[in-house]
Image (cartoon, coloured by chain):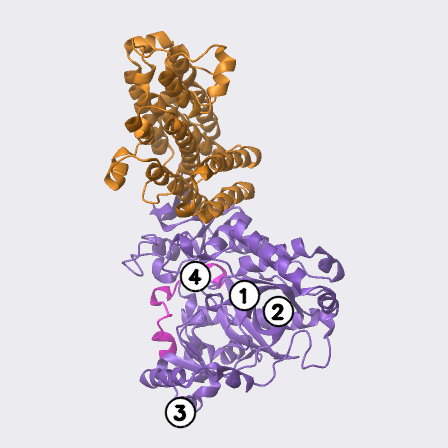
Chain colours: A orange, B purple
Amino acid sequence: MLGRTANDLFWLSRYIERAENMARLIEAGYRIALLPRAGDDRNQEWASTLESAGCTQQYKAKHGVLDTRNVVDFLLFDASNPSSIHTCLATARRNARAQRTALTREMWESLNGSWLEFQTIRPETLRPDALPRILDWIKERSAGYRGALLNTILRNDTFFFSQLGTFLERADNTARILDVKYYVLLPSTSMIGSGVDNAQWEAILRSVSAHRSYRWVYKDSYRSWRIADYLILNRAMPRSLRACYTEIDNTLDDLSGLYGEQEPCAETARSTLALLEKGDIDTIFQSGLHEFLLEFIARNNRVAHEISEAYHFNS
Amino acid sequence: MEQIRAAELKPAFDEMNGFGQGVREPYSAVSGWLDSVRVEDLRKKSAEAELLFRRTGITFNVYGDAEASERLIPFDVVPRIIAAAEWRRLSAGIEQRVKALNAFMYDIYHRQEIIKAGRIPAELVIQNSAFVPEMIGVEPELGIYSHIIGIDIVRTAENEFYVLEDNTRTPSGVSYMLENRETMMHMFPHLFAENRVAPVETYPDNLLKTLESVAPHKLDGDPVIAVLTPGIYNSAYYEHAFLADQMGVELVEGSDLVVMDGYLNMKTTQGLCRVDVLYRRVDDAFLDPLTFDPSSVLGVPGLFDVYRAGNVTIVNAPGAGIADDKAIYTYIPEIIEFYMGRPPILKNVPTYNCRKPDALKYVLENMAELVVKEVHGSGGYGMLVGPTSTKEQVETFRALVRAKPDNYIAQPTLALSTCPTLVDEGIAPRHLDLRPFVLIGDEVRLVPGGLTRVALKKGSLVVNSSQGGGTKDTWVLQD
């Protein structure tokens, strides 16, 4: 396989995953913005949404103050925002076109169909009540693409590089959401168990589609340390850091098997997984949740970088 | 004004109805179908086909424009049909022609016998911008320069076929031949039950066999083949990806390739991997910046040296464009006689080469009746169709030709045959041409069929997709 193909497949998966995550993030932010609270604060939730999406600076430069319409437009439709859903879908489709020969017909048609339909949406004529429908649609299309991938692609390097992109992006996303809101999760004397806390905690869970499953797993109301435990260490939660790294570790194993050679990225991924398997949430809180997450994000980036080096993405 | 002039043309031969003496034999079943089907239903099917093409991404790009520019080539649901006997004659003519073209190229890049024999003027070859001096003395595998040729053929009567031009560089359109068939079989399966249509889907397999057969002879083992594309913004990108996919070979860009230790390599996830046959869909100028255009970022530095050393086969060979130059075209009948020892089976369109004074005089005097083409133009650009042009357009061209006669050829305006086509006013005759794709390797391989291009505008003779032309499925019937 060409190094460029591996690179394009990896980023194609990352962008699809990013679009889906962005849809969840907007959904969670939108719910909070609807909650009754002190008037000026109403739009504050958007600040952490932009922070999680990593585009606070660009937003400020373009729009200045926070307001729902501008934030939603910026995150969904703005072609000049490198993280907007528009950009994610456009880039994913461009990569897919460049790698037509690597994709199955089902994968291509799913992606191409999404892009063609997305282009028919006219943001300026959009009614506010259409937003939830569009966000659902984006999640649905992303699931459709993943489904086509899982159901039709050969289990060779095409599949492996796609998987790596998905789970590295997902791990990064979950870690960022937690990090932006880490202070909400810290035990503090005031507002414990207040409505605001609960809403904030629920927003975090919602942004990874985990607000329902949490109840099933913990049979308890929201507790900050359990939320952190769930999203970082739980092996069954498909968007937890540990679950992502189980997939990454397995995939790199498969890739080493296929190519008959183990690369340094496999070692870095394995030690990251070990950290998550052995970790317990009390220790993480004691030594600092924020520090733990920063360290994780850096490791995650290192794995991505080592993969691109080992498999000649840009040579 | 335009319409009056168009009407002055002789009535055209119709593929289905001839000159009006009733339905021709090959169309008997399809004619019955057209009589029984409602136009609205055909329109529905047509829209369905368009959706299918759009979803599959069978598009062509318009140059100088980015993402928004992917366009569909209109697909017409009425097939174009060629009888078995007609095809036998066409294929014999095509085979003779492509063998002569390759023999001609071998000769002019070696001993130049045809020039010495005085059959073709030396300066027409040597000073031709399509002649690549770097190719002199190079020995391509099996002596073949042009392995894939698209021959544009038009028809004017029951037994009158003419070759309009040869495409010996990087002919495109074969993906439409294949996708059009897929689409027709998907939408109208019963038509294939009623007609014995020869299959075309063996083309990718034939292409692969052809490419394998011209691999460097010193190579042990199976050759590694790759398709070289300029990238996703190229107008024919879909086709490049389609062919690579159908053959199961890598689709590479210049940046994926590197010359190392005398061989061509592609950069893979496991390091460098040797490439033995490069089916390139980029122009000569962009192949190797060290040998050709130094400003090109598309090519592979050092590729030509690897080629000259016989360590990679480039398909089609650099310099193959000399055989489809429009000034050389006028000499093709001579070329066929010279190398094949027989008169051509397929006729050329009579052509006035404006570099000759008497021809120039005739062209200038009769411009309003002629088709005038730029020698190096393509895609229907830089061309005048006299009878359907305004006075001003004719005058503009007259000035152009007078200023630079060497740059132009002219041909009588042929009444291209028509075929029933679904258009706004219903089913109506539209002019068309035919481009069969022929493969030349250890043998000549010709899939029974080709790309039929149809001018969708009433009376128009310009079939190019860049000028609003559409395509049809092309059926060759079996006995």
Of helix, strand and loop, which one carries label 1? Answer: strand
10 Å crowding of disc 4: few (<14), some (14-19), many (20+): many
The mark found on residue B421 in the picture is 2
Instruction: Please identify, in this view, whether the residue under mark 1 or under mark 3 is nearer the observer.
Output: 1
Q: Quadrant of residue A105?
A: top right
User: Residue B136 in magenta?
Assistant: yes
Q: Is A304 contained in the magenta span?
A: no
Who is closer to the viewer here, B365 or B208? Answer: B365
Residue stretch rendered in magenta on the structure: B122-144
Spatial distance from mark 1 to mark 2, Cα to Cα? 10 Å
Which is more N-terminal, label 4 or label 1? 4
Image quadrant where residue B472 sits? bottom right
Q: Which residue is mark 1?
A: B470
Q: Residue at x 67, y 72 (%)?
A: B86
Which of the chains bears the disc numbered 1?
B
**From the image, which quarter does the N terminus of chain A lie in?**
top left
Q: Which residue is mark 4?
A: B317
Q: Mark 1: which amino acid?
A: Gly
Residue A288 position within the rendered picture, expressed as x and y whole percent measured from the top left: 28, 13
Q: Find disc 3 in the rendering and name its residue.
A: B361
Q: CA distance from mark 3 to mark 2?
A: 39 Å
Marks 1 and 3: same chain? yes
For disc 3, the neighbor class at 10 Å (few under 14, some 14 to 19, many from 20) is some
Marks 1 & 4 on one chain: yes
Q: Residues within 10 Å of mark 1 (few under 14, many from 20)?
A: many
Q: The residue under label 4 is which amino acid type?
A: Ala
Whichever of labels 3 and 2 marks the residue nearer the N terminus, that label is 3
- Viewer can see residue A274: no
Q: Is residue B424 left or right of residue B193?
A: left
In-image side of B196 versus A175 (left or right): right
Sequence-wise first label, 1 or 3 = 3
